[in-house]
Image (cartoon, rainbow, N blue to C red):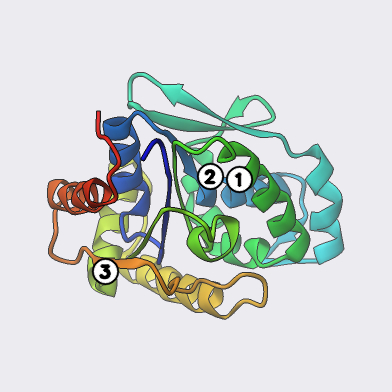
């Protein structure tokens, strides 16, 4: 089998992006963090004043969509893709708590999802891609050759996110992050438009007690079993 599509879905801060990046490097595949795309829309809406005090009017968000231009560019220093919004590197800005607190609501808007999904399908039309998000295996690429559903204990996810943000110099509390994660879990799983669901043919990867190397080994074994050649 030649190149395939690898769809990775799961809850917030369960390590999807980390393992997806490593997997893409290992395979020589493209990597797309779809969550970053929705974060860009949220950041743009915040900058334009369309989100105020955690509230917004859908029509205002929808009007901004034609102006939003997104692309990913490989960063040789981090060996990962940086996210660009209208030519600006916003990788740091989209990870701020104010974006995290609003992104689930923005991503639930049908017109937002329609635009992002169209972009995602275009990126993966030639296969050879690892894409992570909430509805990749169920909606964006239901025909993906390998689907994973990642999860982990809530406190473990909170600690990982806490350490990540503190390492970037952001002042946050453990309780604030845990509350945000639980809220996003609920919103992602209960939204009307393409909710977070485990695809019927997805392989579950609970990484509560697995390190990065163990997770990568687990997935690479699945790929080998599909008959896909590894670099």
Q: Nearer the viewer, mark 2 or mark 3?
A: 3
User: Dots 3 and 1: beta carbons under 8 Å?
Assistant: no
- Residue 209: % across, % down: 13, 64
Q: Earlier in the sequence, mark 3 or mark 1?
A: 1
Q: Secondary structure at mark 1?
A: helix
Q: Residue at x 23, y 52 (%)?
A: 225
**Residue pointed to by mark 2:** 94
Q: Which mark is residue 120?
A: 1
**Residue pointed to by mark 3:** 152
Quarter occupied by residue 23: top left
Q: Tell me how far mark 2 sits from mark 1, CA to CA.
A: 18 Å
Q: Secondary structure at mark 2?
A: helix
Q: Classify mark 3: residues with Cα within 10 Å, few (<14), some (14-19) or many (20+).
A: many
Q: Secondary structure at mark 3?
A: loop
Please give left or right for residue 124 compared with residue 205 in the image.
right
Q: Tell me how far mark 2 sits from mark 3, CA to CA.
A: 23 Å
Image quarter (top left, top right, bottom left or bottom right) of the N terminus: top left
């Amino acid at each position: 089998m030649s190149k395939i599509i690898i769809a990775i879905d799961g809850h917030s801060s369960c390590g999807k992006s980390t393992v997806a990046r490593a997997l893409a490097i290992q395979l020589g595949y493209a990597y797309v963090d779809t969550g970053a795309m929705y974060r860009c829309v949220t950041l743009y809406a915040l900058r334009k004043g369309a989100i105020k005090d955690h509230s917004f009017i859908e029509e205002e968000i929808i009007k901004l969509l034609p102006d939003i231009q997104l692309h990913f560019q490989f960063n040789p220093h981090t060996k990962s893709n940086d996210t660009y919004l209208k030519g600006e590197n916003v990788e740091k800005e989209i990870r701020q708590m104010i974006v995290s607190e609003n992104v689930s609501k923005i991503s639930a808007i049908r017109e937002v999802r329609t635009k992002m999904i169209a972009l995602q399908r275009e990126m993966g039309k030639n296969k050879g891609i690892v894409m992570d998000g909430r509805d990749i295996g169920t909606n964006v690429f239901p025909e993906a050759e390998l689907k994973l559903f990642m999860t982990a204990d809530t406190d473990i996810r909170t600690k990982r996110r806490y350490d990540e943000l503190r390492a970037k110099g952001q002042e946050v509390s453990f309780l604030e992050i845990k509350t945000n994660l639980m809220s996003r879990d609920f919103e992602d799983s209960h939204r009307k438009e393409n909710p977070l669901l485990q695809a019927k043919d997805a392989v579950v990867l609970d990484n509560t007690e697995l390190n990065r190397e163990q997770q990568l080994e687990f997935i690479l074994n699945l790929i080998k079993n599909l008959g896909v050649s590894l670099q």
